[in-house]
Amino acid sequence: MRPVKVERQAAFVLHSRPYRETSLVVEAITRDYGRMALVAKGVRRPRSAMRGVLMGFQPLEITWSGKGDVVTLHNAEWQGGQPLLQGRALLCGYYLNELLINLLPREDAHEQLFEHYSTTLQTLSASETHDAAFFSAALRRFEKRLLGELGYGLMLAHDTSGQPIAADIRYLYEMESGPRIIADSSASAGTISGQTLLDMDAESFDNPVTLIESKQLMRSLMAFYLNGRQLHSRRLFEELADL
């Protein structure tokens, strides 16, 4: 049972929205309690001590109390050490947050996922000189680990018949089943190479083909588990690509 009061819990703000005249409802991911909804009363007042602290992508320590679905935030302290995200890195951060809000149940603790999220933000914040492939690889690693933490781990080392994945064979990845060998070796549309599956298993995305095919696979998987819910950050990525 969740304690009535929790003090100095490591957290990141995922989203916030206005509540009444001077308050916010904050969605946060915490290290030991998972995703939480908190009311930050009076935080929009000019003299509020938390007014400039509840920023996204910044490590915080928060204190709250309450028993219901929405608890009361009492304090938030910035922990520092995390540069602000900018440009493409900021869009990637929004994408991570939308995935967590849409896929992670509230009050379902995933300490390892919290650490993956923190590490990915650090990676993105140090990416000023990197190209689009760097960002794509970072997102694929997080997506893979997120699905694993939620119990939807990918089958990447063996096919649906239990045979080891062969690098030179093409597969069709079936949702919630895994990769199945394609009988027609000339078929390619909607399929994925064994080499890509093996690279994904090793979280190695240096091969350009692996990067393209893994993005296509993860997009299909995320669409399946999102069950029709649309991500605003994905539309922003598409608009950026058009520009």
Image: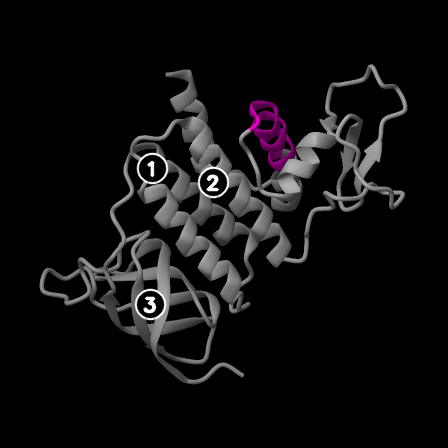
Real-space Cα separation, disc 1 to disc 3, in angstroms:
33 Å
* Label drawn at residue 127: 1
The reply to whether the C-beta atoms of the residues labelled 2 and 3 are less than 8 Å apart is: no
Real-space Cα separation, disc 2 to disc 1, in angstroms:
10 Å
Label 2 packing within 10 angstroms: few (<14), some (14-19), many (20+): some
Residue displayed at 43% across by 34% down = 135
Real-space Cα separation, disc 2 to disc 3, in angstroms:
32 Å
Specify which label sits upstream in the sequence, 2 or 3.
Answer: 3
- Which of 10/16 is in front? 10
Specify which label sits upstream in the sequence, 1 or 3.
Answer: 3
**What is the x, y in percent for residue 148?**
63, 54
Residue displayed at 67% across by 41% down = 224
- Which of 150/167 is in front? 167
In reply to whether residue 172 is colored magenta, the answer given is no
Residue displayed at 67% across by 32% down = 196
Answer yes or no: is residue 123 visible.
Answer: yes
Residue beneath disc 3: 39
- Which of 42/35 is in front? 35
Residue beneath disc 2: 138
In this rendering, the label closer to the viewer, 1 or 3: 1
Q: Is residue 100 above or below residue 158?
A: below
The reply to whether the C-beta atoms of the residues labelled 2 and 1 are less than 8 Å apart is: yes
Quarter of the rendering occupied by the C terminus: top left
Q: Mark 2 is on which residue type? A: Ala
Question: Which segment is the magenta one?
Answer: 207-219
Quick one: SS at disc 3? strand
**What is the x, y in percent for residue 241?**
42, 20
Residue displayed at 10% across by 60% down = 46
Specify which label sits upstream in the sequence, 2 or 1.
Answer: 1
